Image (tube, helix red, strand yellow):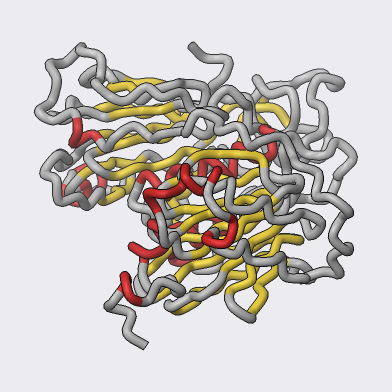
Amino acid sequence: MTPHSPSHAPSQLGSAADWSAAAFAPHAGSGTLARLGGVVLLVASTDPAAVAPLLDQAQMVAANGGDGRQLVRGFALQLSSGAGDEPAFAALAPHGSGLAVIVSGAASVTVDDETITGEGSLSWVERLVPWPIARLVATVDPGGTPLGALYDLGAGVIPAGGVSVSVDETPTMAMSQVVGDAASIPDPAPVPAPAPAPAPAPEPVPVPVPVPVPVPVRPPAPDVVAPPTPAGDRPVLAAMPDAFASFDSVKLRDLEDDEPVTPLPIVADQRDVQASGVVSEVRGVFCKNRHFNDPRVLFCAVCGINMVQQTPVLVNGERPPLGVVVLDDGAVFQLDTDYLLGRDPDADDRVRHGDCRGISIIDTSNMVSRVHARLELRGWDVVLVDNTSTNGTFVNSPKAVEWRRMAAGGDEVLTPGTRIRIGHRTLAFNTHGGQSAAGQSVS
Ligand SMILES: [Zn+2]
């Protein structure tokens, strides 16, 4: 096998470049399919509220280069810290010598003769499938059928129950295939039968033509805006609306569910979670199940019970972690103390004296200050403060259309799902599976 002769080995995917150039043919069926750079996400849901958190994750990975290892770690963290009611999905991205695959629930990815499925698994299944790959089919709807060569997902987010990936032998001829001779059209790989697939329907009912939702093009990395615009200028970042940006990804727990839920993310590698052990007192209220909460919330952040039906009594208590910050390499930092973010935060006296912790933002762009920004816990709020950094701190809140440069030295309360960009690096702030309204009631 000579993987180094791509043009003469047209029947196999032998590299990340092949993967990027491959043809992605959607299948009919119920689900959502996204192709964002090298990242492919297939979700067994068309409910925007259910899809959005997964899509956000895929976008974050895609924006940071679409590395498969980061993809798997990011989704694994999301699943382990989530409420467990995520829809089944499969996500794929290249990593080094192969294709990284993560599958959760009744989704399946068939690579050549092997099927990877999360069905029957208590958590998720991940694999690094070595190149070359001759045939790949992912599906969340076993009854779905290939739509044929008329459809080829170049990029974007569309309704689909599955996808077949094949080497695109005529990348520039896509349109001619619409009218072209069927014989030349690459054979749409048949759906494998991970589950007893029903016999082909008499006539595959064409699903609505996948309407390409405006591709949620990520804003370019901030180096695009370099040289830095004068402070106060509107960041010159692309403003393509994020198709799902307007949907709230907040998940409230089932109110009947009285099972204690650990508020901490369970991460496979505990070294990934950096906790301080610092204890701070805040004023808060207890839910009926004795979980300590932000007095502004309507539902307990841990068990989801309605807080309104009881008379709130403000008491002092130990502040629980207010969530986590996830760096784009998958490192997770628990928000139980303040953090300094920058090129060399550990040299700062505040870190050396143990008043806060450092998150090293390693970036070759020279756009990151030694202490670039900090995260402060104020009461029940997580506040991002720009440390009058030279090249600015950028934020993108879940409902915002575009990235925004913070005022130099400015601060703002973070809402769950907000992304932070420093230099070329991205971090995401999230609460745990339970949702508090902290931050939403503060301007
Ligand atoms: Zn509770």
Residue 111 visible to the viewer: yes
Q: Residue at x 52, y 53 (%)?
A: 40
Residue 379 on image: x %, y %: 50, 27
Quadrant placement of the N terminus: bottom left
> Which of the 4 image quadrants contains residue 113?
bottom right
Viewer-closest of 168 and 233? 168
Q: Residue at x 49, y 28 (%)?
A: 242
Residue 279 located left or right of residue 81: left
Residue 400 located left or right of residue 314: left
Residue 239 on image: x %, y %: 37, 22
- In the figure, 72 relative to 202: above or below? below
Q: Residue at x 28, y 77 (%)?
A: 5
Viewer-closest of 378 and 177? 177
Q: Residue at x 80, y 49 (%)?
A: 204
> Which of the 4 image quadrants contains residue 383?
top left
Residue 301 visible to the viewer: no
In the rendered image, the residue lying farthest to the bottom is 1
Viewer-closest of 210 and 173? 173
> Which of the 4 image quadrants contains residue 102?
bottom right
Residue 169 located left or right of residue 163: left
Residue 176 on image: x %, y %: 47, 45
Residue 331 on image: x %, y %: 41, 56
How many numbered discs?
Answer: 0
- In the figure, 218 relative to 143: above or below? above
